[in-house]
Image: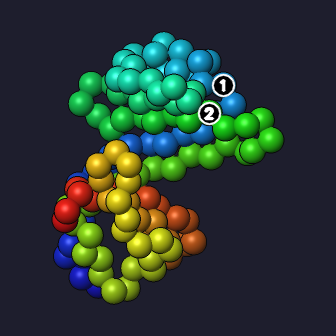
Amino acid sequence: MSTEGIEPRGIEAVFLETHNWGKAAKFFQSLGFELEFETDHSSGQLRNGDGPYVFIAEVPESKETAMQIVLKVPAETLDPSVEVVTPFDNTHYGTREATVRDPDGRTWSLQAPAGS
């Protein structure tokens, strides 16, 4: 199988959902992560050094929390053998994201630069 165009550049981010933004942010700060920004809707981004960022979003207690690892890819070109769940689309924060499914049924978020 050709991997041209889909070779990850690494882990871009970890997206976490929480029932308590403040407690979650303090937990990661106690591990050495620094708050890069906080939104006005109980979410924000933290980072430890030059590594991937952690984006945490508060969800209602009635919703089960989830976690998603985001892989950074150099472009939107995917090998035809990759099962695309949702195609690349613009985000409100300046990138393009897609969701794919691996052979074991897990879904992965992919992030490519805008305009790739």
Residue 73 sits in quarter:
bottom left
Work out whether residue 85 or residue 4 is closer to the camera in this orientation and state it.
Answer: 85
> Where residue 102 sits: x, y (%)?
48, 71
Label 2 is placed on what type of residue? Answer: Glu
Work out whether residue 4 or residue 86 is closer to the camera in this orientation and state it.
Answer: 86
The quadrant of the picture occupied by the C terminus is bottom left
- Please give the residue where the numbered disc 2 appears in the rendered image: 58
Residue drawn at (54%, 39%) of the image: 16
Residue drawn at (49%, 43%) of the image: 15
Residue drawn at (37%, 65%) of the image: 89
Label 1 is placed on what type of residue? Answer: Asn
Residue 74 can be seen, yes or no: yes
Residue contact between numbered discs 2 and 1, judged by CB atoms under 8 Å:
yes
Distance of label 2 from label 1 (alpha carbons): 6 Å
Q: How many marks?
A: 2
Q: Residues within 10 Å of mark 1 (few under 14, many from 20)?
A: some
Secondary structure type for disc 2: strand
Please indicate whether residue 113 sits to the left or right of residue 89 in the image.
left
- Please give the residue where the numbered disc 1 appears in the rendered image: 20
The quadrant of the picture occupied by the N terminus is bottom left
